[in-house]
Image (cartoon, helix red, strand yellow):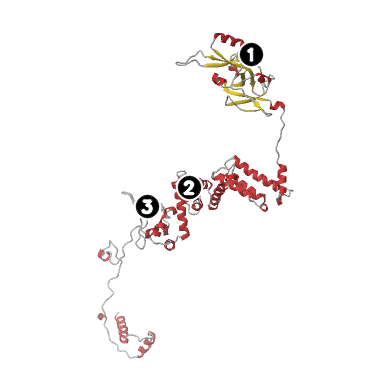
Amino acid sequence: MASSACALAFSAAAHLARGPSPPGVSSRLQSSRWRRSPVRLVPVQAGDIPDTAGPPSRLIVPGMDGFDPSLVSGAGRAPAKMPGQFPGGYDAPPKPGSEKAAGEEFAPFRPPSAYQAGATLMQEDDQMSLLRLRQRAGSWYDLSPLFAKLMRSGFTPDDIFDESGIEPKEQSLWITWAASRGSLVDDPRFPEEKLAYFNDEYNGAPTLSSIQYLVAEKRSAAAEFVVDNEFDQEQTKELVKAFEIRDAHQSQAKGFGSTPGECMAFKMWRDCQEVQRYQGMEKVNDLVRKGKKYAETESTVERLEAMAEMWRMDFAEGSELTTGGSLAKAVATARANINTVRLDADEIAFKPIPHLGSMERLTTGAVSAVQQVFTAGIFNVFQPAGAREFVALPAWSALGEARQPFAVSVGNTGTLKGAGDLSQREEPALIVADKANTTPSPSFYYLVARTSSITLTGGAGAQIVDIFPGREVMDMERAGGCTVIGRVVLAVRAPGGMGDGMNTGTSL
């Protein structure tokens, strides 16, 4: 131990004797030079060197013996960053409801999109607005008003881009989309649940750029059509174009409606007319198929099919119509046909008869209003008078004898009391009577109205209409209490008969 201390003292003394090294001279050269210099040795005792080792070091943490809290009480330490703060001193966007309730260990979860919206965003300072845009802390339609707010504060679109990373073109799109979406929000005709389709910044929202060009009366229906059919931006442009074409060609749009689907079908119909022949029939079929997909009426479908048929004629195999010209029109005209038919005398021989409805509801007042109907011309044209309904019957001889005939319906002939053989059947029939013949005769049957024996309290007896033979009608007239409405001239049964050979009618 003593020899080691002596050697250490000797080395230290030699180093101090040398002094600082000259500049530019390495320590290796210096050591070789000093080794050649005479050195005076000074004996040193071990007790002359103080003990600097001290006690062995150990880590002291809070709670151990010897820990002094005053040594670590914030001296020289940076203040701790509070929760909800960002570097630079900005507070994080607040999340309403994120505070822990009393007695709960954790705060309720709130999705990132639940930031403050509306007027609260407009009251924040510009740095907070830029922070929100930089982090896209919210939906595009909630953040779009911040652009106008920042511009009023002196920021240009390029400045906003530098601070938030949102390009000027995207800023302009957000502002346009928000205006179009706002008009749908304010329109009570647009279903609120369908607004979610436009929340997607990359699929649904771009369609608003085209919807904005429609007038307010059509915008709601068009937007709902876009949502229902999941249109993209290009399809929405085509829809808006369809509205413009429909408005510009009102005279050609006969048979087409004005709904979004009908406008699309009309555009396809118009596009078929502009197809070039080199595009072939396949192009026409695609347009017709697309138009029928959106068509909402039968007339629209028929017009699209007629357009396709016209093109099929032009592209018929073996024809020269593929070159167009007058030959196409000539062949198309030759294929068109008008069906013609010549009437026989029996086929045009019919007689219009006023129809007064059901016999159960027949009144003498309705019979009094019946007028004689006359036919004119070679096609027996007539003008209705005296009734709201008419039935056309063949000009049988029995009808020819009637001067003022009218018809009533019977649901079941079995309910008739005095109609002879007709009362034995149970089938519907049409009873034709002559209003001009009300004098009873034993050779005919008559339609008679009688007063019911049942009288309602405070009112007169109801009239009951039925068919009776002439002999019985004469007795009823002598007794009083009946009104002869007319002579029954014909009973018309339903087609097919009842297996007895009678297919048309029988006279009572």
Comes first in the chain, label 3 or label 2 = 3
Q: Is residue 483 visible?
A: yes
Q: CA distance from mark 3 to mark 1?
A: 93 Å
Indicate whether 62 appears above or below 252.
below
Amino acid on which disc 1 is placed? Phe
Image marks 3 and 2: residues in contact by CB distance under 8 Å? no
Q: CA distance from mark 1 to mark 2?
A: 73 Å
The residue where tag 2 is placed is 216
Amino acid on which disc 3 is placed? Ala
Amino acid on which disc 2 is placed? Ala
Q: Secondary structure at mark 1?
A: loop
Within 10 Å of disc 1 (Cα), the crowding (few <14, some 14-19, many 20+) is some
Towards the viewer: 43 or 305: 305
- Quarter of the figure with residue 80: bottom left
The residue where tag 1 is placed is 444
- Residue drawn at the location 45% of the way across and 52% of the way down: 179
Within 10 Å of disc 2 (Cα), the crowding (few <14, some 14-19, many 20+) is few
Q: Secondary structure at mark 2?
A: helix
The residue where tag 3 is placed is 119
> Is 177 placed left or right of 320 in the picture?
left
Q: Is residue 427 visible?
A: no
Give percent across and percent down for residue 372: 61, 22
